Image (cartoon, rainbow, N blue to C red):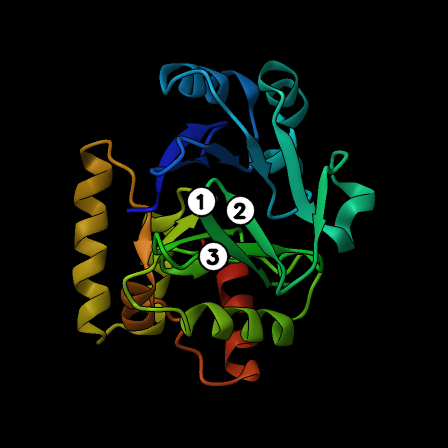
Amino acid sequence: MPVSATAIPCLSDNYAWLLRDAATGTVAICDPGEAAPIIAALEAAGGRCDLILLTHHHGDHVAGVEEVRARFGAKVVGAAADAHRLPPLDQALRPGERVSVGATEGEVIDTPGHTVGHIAFHFPEGGVLLCGDTLFSLGCGRLLEGTAEQMFHSLRALAALPEATLACCGHEYTESNARFALTVEPDNAALRTRAEEVKAQRAAGQATVPTTIGQERAANPFIRATDVARLAAIRTAKDNFR
């Protein structure tokens, strides 16, 4: 596999993602929300970090950037549109542009909704998608800055990726997402199966991500929404779900 992705738990329910390019040994970290566990994981993986990839500006995704940068000399990559509110960028990218992790090239996908400047990184050769807080397993991000229309089109763009693509999400929200999703599609067999898997994984202390685009197409009510109005209704219901 040209590039591999490993989850690093941080904060209360965040994941940063460690990427390694098999051909060159190049290492990148995506969304370092807390320095200590990420530095520990990087040291355990060989003490190298060449790139820091940022999906959006929220503190729980960027708070560890400066310490990781200082420790390893990593270059910081993020959205040009959000450069004014991200840590200082060494490479400011626009949607459709490319970023390299060693010999593996990734594409920047515009994914507004959770924030207006949110981006995702897709590495087709490795089948890896770093989707931040746009797509969650069985869920999607809150519309904190963007609109339901923006989120709808963002999810459509991600749903169009190959079904085996690993969706590396920013949070461990799957168990609560499953409870809500079952109120939306109680007769969805794929969703019921996934909910049982998730319950067992969490009981065993295991991560439920990465998920795959194929799993989300089959079971995620947000990605399955047929139009903007439907997505907006589901998102509002989730915001009020307890």
Residue at x-position 35% and y-position 67%: 220
Residue at x-position 40% and y-position 69%: 161
Does label 1 or label 3 sit earlier along the sequence?
A: 1
Residue at numbered disc 3: 122
For disc 3, the neighbor class at 10 Å (few under 14, some 14 to 19, many from 20) is many
Q: Is residue 37 left or right of residue 63?
A: left
Asked whether 184 or 43 is in front, the reply is 43
Asked whether 219 or 98 is in front, the reply is 98
Disc marking residue 103: 1
How many angstroms separate mark 1 from mark 3 (CA)? 14 Å
Q: Nearer the viewer, mark 1 or mark 3?
A: 1
Whole-percent x and y of residue 23? 35, 38
Q: Is residue 97 above or below residue 174?
A: below
For disc 1, the neighbor class at 10 Å (few under 14, some 14 to 19, many from 20) is some
For disc 2, the neighbor class at 10 Å (few under 14, some 14 to 19, many from 20) is some
Give yes or no for contact between labels 1 and 2 (Cβ–Cβ under 8 Å): yes
Asked whether 209 or 237 is in front, the reply is 209
Disc marking residue 53: none
How many angstroms separate mark 1 from mark 2 (CA)? 7 Å
* Amino acid found under the numbered disc labelled 2: Ser
Whole-percent x and y of residue 15? 44, 36
* Amino acid found under the numbered disc labelled 1: Ala
Residue at numbered disc 2: 100
Q: Quadrant of residue 187?
A: bottom left
* Amino acid found under the numbered disc labelled 3: His
Whole-percent x and y of residue 160? 42, 74
SS label for mark 2: strand
Q: Nearer the viewer, mark 3 or mark 2?
A: 2
Whole-percent x and y of residue 116? 71, 60
How many angstroms separate mark 3 from mark 2 (CA)? 11 Å
